[in-house]
Image (cartoon, grey):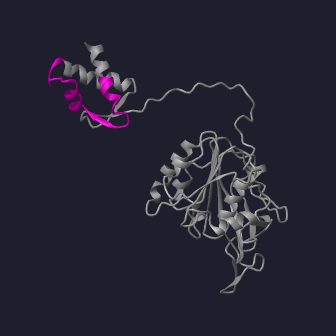
Amino acid sequence: MTERLSDKILEYLQTAVGREVNLRDIRLFLKIEPGSRDDQNLRVQMAVNMVRAKVVKPSGRGDGIYKVLEPVIPVNFSLDGEDSEGVLDVRYPRSYTDDTTFGLGDMVELSESDLVEITGETNFGKTAIALSFLGENLGLYPKNVLMGSEYTSSEGEISPKLKRRLRRMDWAKWMDDKGKPRFKLLPVEHDYEDYVEHNGLTVIDWISLPGEYYLIDTVLKAIKNRVGRGLVVAVLQKNKGAEFAEGGQRAERYADLVLKVDRFGDSESMLTVGKVKSAKGRATGRMFAFSIVNYGANLMDIREIVKCPKCWTRGYVMSGNEKKRCPSCEGKRYIDK
């Protein structure tokens, strides 16, 4: 009787995976009388056998409520193969105007299923870097996707602004030999994970969750779960002077590489290497100044910068009781390395 009862219990629990169940509903389903011998067996099966088998877990309140667990299958693996297995041959954003570079290829390593985040203030180069990632890596995978609600017109066509920018980025081969785009342009504003290119390259510019940025880690986890062996580059907005993107520290929870873009002086931008899960050498905290030229189409004059040793990033020095702009960094707080 016990084995048959356990089979019936499992049959019921399989219909409620991921949800909570209680003893009362199970009794009704199995037509068990409260206080009967079968009822006692049911309690033992749920509180002992099903818990030990990791089929359910109790609420902890002794109220007969259980959470039905998702079945987890152990992963079979071996350590055979090359050390470079799964590592991606990623090309990183650089300048085609003066051949300067951030040197990211010497600092970090990206692998299949990784998530790259580009965070920053509005209008200081996030899109330029995101599109450079796409243009540089169109040959990394056979399928590529660019998501963004601002890349299309109200008629569902590519926006003239994006079209002009891609033409100016003439170092990238955006079209194939038949004149067709080498990437899908998707006007996506929500449910981003549903449109990620499985085993391909996906660039999302940008993720918007108005009033719900507390969900950012949940959204990014869902996106990462869909990428397979591919790569995702996601752009996130960051308030002026903020360390983290909207959503705070949770926005970086599932990121493998974070690049932060901020204002630098009056006319330049600054890229700071943030979180790095797989670093080849010193990476996190390194900073680079750069310019955006040709209407946002290209980067220029990329160079590493360090904290100003005279004002220590205050941007000013004291002369008596008066604050004066630092003569070393001219108020920028950082100087060329």
**Residue numbers of the magenta segment:** 9-37
Whole-percent x, y for residue 233 in the image = 63, 52
Residue that protrudes farthest toward the top in the picture: 1
- Residue shown at 60%/69% (left/top)? 122
Nearer to the camera, 160 or 325: 160
Residue that protrudes farthest toward the front in the picture: 178
Q: Is residue 303 visible?
A: yes
For the C terminus, the image quarter is bottom right
- 13 falls in the magenta region: yes
Q: Is residue 308 visible?
A: no
- 153 falls in the magenta region: no
Whole-percent x, y for residue 26 in the image = 24, 29
Q: Quadrant of residue 57?
A: top left
Q: Quadrant of residue 96?
A: bottom right
Whole-percent x, y for residue 224 in the image = 56, 45
Q: Is residue 65 above or below residue 73?
A: below
Q: Is residue 44 above or below residue 334?
A: above
- Residue shown at 63%/39% (left/top)? 229
For the N terminus, the image quarter is top left
Classify residue 208 as left or right of residue 161: left
